[in-house]
Amino acid sequence: MKVGPTSAGTFDARVRQLVEYLPGLTAIIRPLLEARAAIRSQFVVLHRLLLDLVRDDPVCRRFMTVPGVGAVVSITFQATVDIPQRFTSSKAVGAHFGLTPRAFNSGETDYTGRISRCGDALMRATLYEAAHTLLTHTQRWCSLKAWGVRVAQRRGLAKATVAVARKREKIRINSVHPGYADTPLTEQRFSDPAVRQALLDRTPMGRLGTALDIANGVLFLASDESSWVTGSELVIDGGMTAQ
């Protein structure tokens, strides 16, 4: 039976049309189609549960700011890494997922082979899919995509995809430490002239911060311009703690 070009939504109707006048084949195909429909409906339910879980998880939402990373990739990565403190560095994460190349050393023999493929195969496949999406579907350019495209031009798309998947493990970790700022949450507290003046006297910049001041610092850490910044503590308090 040749189904021909179809989609996930039209597959059922197309198959039923082909077996309409074939009672023997219909008796075999109909239960399979009903089982497929039940699985698809349950998949939708489970996918919605996953989206709700990711939506309320700040770590997953941060992962999803990376181009090519969606809900499934972010929650799979978080669940697989589990406790980040058990890895001494970001390079160790790539080795844990089997994305680092094998090394052969014996006497005068010393060469590098393909990736080891150790560790969690599902996580490795998920990262590969995310890397492939970044290189082939994502329209927005970033330093990671530009690097991957250059590798693809030299070594081919398959090897570039593996390289990008491995490079994604090098996650930068920085923190932002804001000072006193005028926001709707602090409006009532800072409305007291005495309290406000006391804070201004302690701030070398002579004013309280704003939400935009804090947001600009976060935006810098999230941008490609800070690609070599990791392990830093960005203090945005008008110089108060530097005194």
Image (spheres, rainbow, N blue to C red):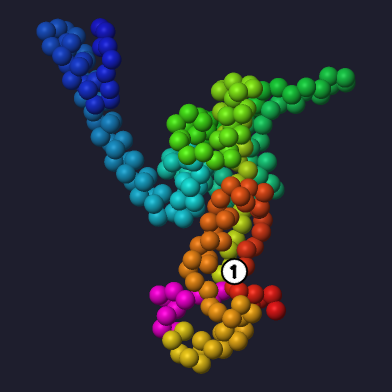
Quarter the C terminus occupies: bottom right
Q: Which residue lies furthest to the bottom in this view?
A: 194
In the rendered view, does 14 fall on the left or right side of 195?
left
**Position in image of residue 109 (x %, y %):** 83, 19
The question of residue 181 being in magenta is answered with yes
The residue sitting at 64% across, 75% down in the picture is: 239
**Is residue 126 something one can see in this rendering?**
no
In the rendered view, does 80 fall on the left or right side of 204?
left
Which region of the structure is painted magenta? 179-189
Above or below for 158 versus 18: below
Above or below for 14 versus 133: above
Above or below for 110 versus 38: above
Quarter the N terminus occupies: top left
Which is more toward the observer, 219 or 121?
219
Which is more toward the observer, 118 or 27?
118
Q: Which residue lies furthest to the right in this view?
A: 107
**Position in image of residue 236 (x %, y %):** 59, 69
Above or below for 18 versus 110: above
Q: Which residue lies furthest to the front in this view?
A: 206
In the rendered view, does 70 fall on the left or right side of 163?
left
Instruction: Using a 10 Å C-alpha cutoff, classify the residue at mark 1 as few (fewer than 14 neighbours), some (14 to 19) or many (20 or more).
Output: many
The residue sitting at 62% across, 84% down in the picture is: 202
- Badge 1 amino acid: Ile
The residue sitting at 60% across, 23% down in the picture is: 153
Which is more toward the observer, 164 or 127?
164
**Position in image of residue 86 (x %, y %):** 65, 49
**Position in image of residue 42 (x %, y %):** 28, 36
> Which quarter of the figure has residue 117?
top right
For disc 1, the marked residue is 236
The residue sitting at 66% across, 52% down in the picture is: 229
The question of residue 77 being in magenta is answered with no
* Badge 1 element: strand
